[in-house]
Amino acid sequence: MILIRANRNKIMTQNTQDLTKFAEMLCTRFCHDIIGPIGAVSNGAEFLREELPNMQSQAFDLIEKSSREAISRVQFYRQAYGAGLKNSSASLTEAKNTAAHFFEGTKTQLVWEDKYTDMAPVNIDYVQKKLILNLLIICSSALIRGGKITFTIDESKFEILAEGTSVKIDPDVESALKSDSSEMVLDPKLIQVNYTKVLAGEANSELKMRHASDMLAFTVVKK
């Protein structure tokens, strides 16, 4: 377990080793989520190599589907975790399209109306965009049997609502999300939460959470 201290502008690490550990955990999370579709591509190639009867069509379908999924996930995590100019503006339409591709073919339906894209009189920067994408990750992980995620935004706040027949979140994760403490324990289970809370601090926003057996909602209010 490693403790780091976060504030609105930066993560204050105890030493370089702590910062390295933080990066390692984010990379581990990223690799965990893309290894599935990449492995499926490998399986499809193996089917073709063995020239199994009546398997070529299925193999091509598997490779095509899994390749699209891997590309979508890499693009999503590049925007959710990648570096950028903190004060630069970001596109709500691009965020919507990135999320839509991420959930395509899954049991999770994304509801993000066009009025909440660049058509809306709302501006976001790249930190707020990353915050939105990271909250989508947390919500999708809570939808054990799939469900629906709805995004809305106005000039003062945005909300992400996950609904399903089974919405579960680890007690330690829920406790970390609700905590107002600036000191956070870094371990693999909490890395996504820690990073999300840091982003909320950088965005100068208050993160509010509601949870029940059939829903999980995050409201992010600008201070």
Image (cartoon, rainbow, N blue to C red):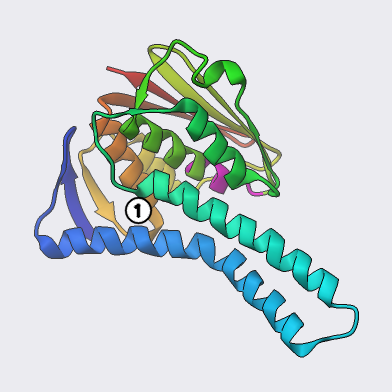
Q: Is residue 140 magenta?
A: yes
Which residue is found at the position 48% from the left and 43% from the top? Answer: 138
Q: Is residue 204 magenta?
A: no
Q: Quadrant of the N terminus?
A: bottom left
Please give the residue where the numbered disc 1 appears in the rendered image.
191
Which residue is found at the position 71% from the left and 39% from the top? Answer: 165
Q: As drawn, is 174 to the left or to the right of 65?
A: left
Question: Which x, y percent locates residue 30?
Answer: 43, 59
Which residue is found at the position 70% from the left and 59% from the top? Answer: 65
Whether residue 1 is visible here, answered yes or no, is no
Callout 1, which amino acid? Ile
Whether residue 161 is visible here, answered yes or no, is yes
> Residue 216's image quarter?
top right
Q: As drawn, is 94 to the left or to the right of 10?
A: right
Between residues 145 and 9, which one lies in front from this camera angle? Answer: 9
Residue lying at the far right of the rendered structure:
54
Question: Which x, y percent locates residue 58?
Answer: 82, 70
Which span of residues is magenta-colored? 138-144
Q: Quadrant of the C terminus?
A: top left
The answer to whether 166 is drawn above or below residue 40 in the figure is above
Q: As drawn, is 48 to the left or to the right of 11?
A: right
